[in-house]
Image (cartoon, coloured by chain):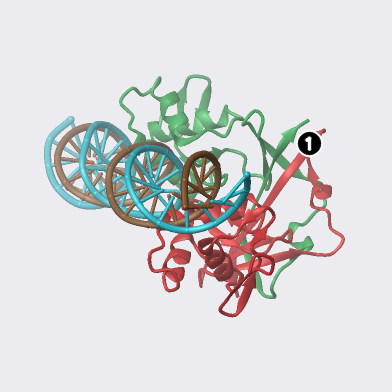
Chain colours: A red, B green, C brown, D cyan
Amino acid sequence: MTTQGIQNRETTIPEEINGLRMTRQRQEVYRFLMGERTHPTANEVFMRIKEALPNVSLATVYNCLEALVQHKIIRQVNFDREPSRYCPNLDEHGHFHDETTGTIHDVKFKPGINLTDILDLPPNTVIKDIEITLRGQLA
Amino acid sequence: MTTQGIQNRETTIPEEINGLRMTRQRQEVYRFLMGERTHPTANEVFMRIKEALPNVSLATVYNCLEALVQHKIIRQVNFDREPSRYCPNLDEHGHFHDETTGTIHDVKFKPGINLTDILDLPPNTVIKDIEITLRGQLA
DNA sequence: CGGAAAATTAGAATGGTTCTTATTTTGATC
DNA sequence: GATCAAAATAAGAACCATTCTAATTTTCCG
C-alpha cells in the first residue's frame, strides 16, 4: 500500500508525481483531466469530482490545480479573459478555439519546427514558455 | 473643421477611423496608446488621460478601448489572467513578456514565414486570429 | 502514540471588468 | 439656429473568477 500507488476506479495513479504527493483530491482532479479532451474549467472539475468526493470544496480544486500546474503535471490555458482551462497534454502544442462550438482542440507543430527559429527575438533571450492560441471556425 | 480632423496637442487624429467616430475620449485613449510602447492596462490609460480629461471615467476608458478593439484600430493582449493590455501595433506579431522587468516586447515573425504552415491544423479550418505569447528573461 | 507540517474546507475578500441608470453630447432635420 | 432621437459618457453598483483567511482535518515521522 505504500509502494504501489493507490487503486481507484479504472485508473491507477502513483502516490507521487514530480515530487507532488498525490492526495485523494489531487488524484480525482488529475484523473478527471486525464480522461477529458475538453480542457475543463476549475468549476467544471469541481462539479465533476464532487460525485466522488461530495465534501470537496472549490478552493481545494483551485489548490489542486495550482499544485499540479506548478509541478508540471498539467498545463493551465487561458483564452482571452475567460475562466482558465486545464490540460493534461504536456507536449509542446497550441490551442485552437472553435468559435462555433466553443470547443478547444490541441494543435501540434509540424515535425522539425523549432518555434524560436521563426521568431525575431531580441538577442540573449531565454524563453521559458510559449503559448499559441488560434481562434476561428471549422468550415 | 468638419473635413480635416481635429487638431490636438502634437498629433492630429481623424474624425473617424475604420467607421468609428473619434470622440474626444477615444482620441485621447488612442493618442496615448500610439505614443506608448509599454502595452498599458485600462487603468494606466485611465490615469494618464485624466490629465487631459479630468472628468473621464474608467467605464468610458473601457468603452473606448472596446470600441477601438472592435474596429480593429488597436489590439487587446492578455497574459495569463493579468489585466488586459492594449497595443496599437496591428501587424501580425507576438509578445515577449520579460519576467525580470515585467516589460512586454513585440516580437516579429521572420520574413516569409506563414504561421499556419508550421501548425498541424485540422482540415477546413478558418483562422481568424493568432496569439503568440512568450515568457522568459533577457539574460 | 504525539506533535509538526501539510492539506482541506468554508466563506469572506479581492480586483478587473461589465452593467445600469441618468446625464450629456452629437447628428440629422427642419 | 431650434428640436428631437441616437450615441456616448459618467458614476457607481454588480459580477464573477480567483485568492485569501482562519479553522479543522489529515498526513508524516520520530
| Quarter of the image with the N terminus of chain B in it | top left
* Figure quadrant of residue B46: top left
| Quarter of the image with the C terminus of chain B in it | top right
How packed is label 1: few (under 14 Cα within 10 Å), some, or many (20 or more)? Answer: some
The residue located at (62%, 39%) in the rendering is B89
Residue C19, position as x, y percentages in the image: 28, 52
Residue identifier under label 1: A125
Does C9 appear above or below B25?
Answer: below
The residue located at (53%, 20%) in the rendering is B10
Residue B20 visible within the image:
no
Does A51 appear above or below C25?
Answer: below
Which element is circle 1 on?
strand
Residue D13, position as x, y percentages in the image: 21, 42
D30 and B45: which one is in front? D30
Residue A101, position as x, y percentages in the image: 51, 72
Residue A57 visible within the image:
yes
